[in-house]
Amino acid sequence: MNETVPAPLPRIAMAGLSLEASTYSPAITTAADLHPRRGTDVLDRYEFLRPGTELRGAATWFPVLQGRGVPGGPVPLDDYLALKAEILAGLAAAGPLDGMILDLHGAMSVLGMDDAEGDLAVAVREVVGPDVIISTGMDLHGNVSWRLAEALDLLTCYRMAPHEDALDTKERAVRNLLQRLAMPGRPRPLKAWIPIPVLLPGEKTSTRIEPAKSLYAMVPEVEAQDGVLDAAIWIGYAWADEPRNMAVVMVTGDDEATIVAGAERIASAFWERRHEFSFVAPTGTLEECLDSAMASAARPYFISDSGDNPTAGGAGDVTWSLAELLKREEFASGETTGIYASIPDPAAVEACWQAGVGADVDLLVGAIVDAGPSGPVRLRGRVEHLHEGDPDALREVVVRAGGLAVLLTEVRKPYHLEVDFTRNGLDPRGTDVVIVKIGYLEPELFEMSSDWMLALTPGGVDQDLPRLGHHRITRPMYPFNPAMATPDLHARLVPAANAVASVEA
Ligand SMILES: [Zn+2]
């Protein structure tokens, strides 16, 4: 009887930078804003990689550095280069590797640079060498340039917007990698890549509604075919102005004809249905949305204040909508109750903290980063609640002005969960109108709302794309060139990484 020697565990490194950054936001995202984690803290971010899990035990892990920031403005070049250098040094120090997870969002804008993720991926590839299999699980609002597709082996992305499958996608990227590493000879998967010249905001491409619902339903169908490992559709990121910003379809696997046919089938369907993409909820000016909310019996009635949505990259402190709300007699008189979330302003928060609960305050709030059309807004009211300890907002204050409760934060913070309100002593379910800086409603807010509208307000992530003025995106591009001819939607096979050098030469 032969003694079996257990195969050594694959050596897998993990690193990455995850950010969605609007080049139309005056904010910047520093290296510190990306909250870089190092060493095993990197692994602990993912539930499926915590100590004792199957996947943690399936490899010898070399976690290097993972940065992740709240969506915002672009990263200064030096901040990016410092993080990149640390990642590359950590990878070099890890020694020979079998695989790598490069965890990316795909829409990180870096000042003075195009295609930041492509730049990082190429640099990582140069350090780890051509034989290491690199896998990524991205946000579907990320961008996949040819360069990025070339430098990596396994690319997949979320299949749901809102991103209820975010963690599943990260896990799939790990499982796809482990599966490849377990195959005899570790063959590189073939990659079919199709850029689709369509650039749309996330608020028109929710997978809860058509046509994205049907298009994303094609993903598992294509993936289920023999010879296919993964299929993915990237919507791309609309609030940056680079040649890479557009939709992309990729199918990876081992059967060339099948992955090409699958990718082309999805890409054609996407193109054919481009006119059907529309906002996920009724839209209007803020005034129209408020008029509808006041006239409606549905309570609570939610309004998305979408132009300065911090989860898409807005600065978060544009005050235009708050100024409009404070003018409404229904709120001023207290006849209608409302919640407004939120305005970051550390000085105003400090003033409320000093004044204490129950004190009357007279504040100028917001417009520190993004002055917007209205500048700082005068907010007179009573400090109703103080809270400290939210990891994003730090300190939070509720100031009540008539029927309207206004949330002020020390640091920009998205309000996505019921607990974000209840920990501040607010009861959104018992409130008439809840106005949140957000695009489509996140699941808990959607579930809570009796009705909702999306207000097309000004800010760094204005939903009215043509009024932003893109100059550098690839043209023609739908809907910027609405009458454009049908583009070439044939799949291009992306060479494996070890061929990158010869292709570039
Ligand atoms: Zn996204």
Image (spheres, rainbow, N blue to C red):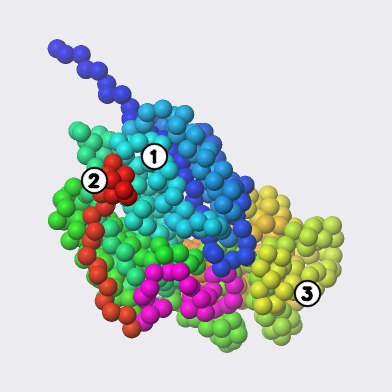
Q: Position of residue 321 (x, y in %)?
A: 65, 76
Q: Helix or strand or loop: what does disc 3 sit on?
A: strand
| Crowd around label 3: few <14 · some 14–19 · many ≥20 (10 Å) | some
10 Å neighbourhood of mark 1: few (<14), some, or many (≥20)? Answer: some
- Judged from the image, the secondary structure of the residue bearing numbered disc 2 is loop
Look at the image and tell me whether residue 165 can be seen. Answer: no
Residue at the (82%, 64%) spot, across then down: 358
Location of residue 438 (image quadrant): bottom right
Residue 31, given in percent of the width and then of the height, sits at 59, 48
Q: Is residue 489 depicted above or below 87 in this figure?
A: below
Residue 281 placement, left or right of 154: right
Question: For residue 139, what is the image quadrant?
Answer: bottom left
- Considering every residue shown, the one lying at the far front of the view is 505
What kind of residue is marked 1? Glu
Secondary-structure class at tag 1: helix
Q: Position of residue 274 (x, y in %)?
A: 32, 76
**Which labelled disc corresponds to residue 86?**
none
Main secondary structure along the magenta-highlighted residues: loop
- Give, as a single range, the part of the protein colored magenta: 456-482
Q: Nearer the viewer, residue 306 or 268?
A: 268
Mark 3 Cβ inside 8 Å of ligand 1:
no
Q: Which residue is mark 3?
A: 378
Residues at marks 1 and 3, CA–CA distance in whole angstroms: 54 Å
Give coordinates of residue 247: x percent, y percent.
36, 65
Residue that carries the numbered disc 1 in the rendered image:
126
Mark 1 or mark 3, earlier in chain: 1
Crowd around label 2: few <14 · some 14–19 · many ≥20 (10 Å)? many
Residue at mark 2: 189
Residue sitting nearer the eye, 414 or 194:
194
Instruction: Name the foreground residue: 446 vs 188.
Output: 188
Q: Amino acid at mark 2?
A: Pro
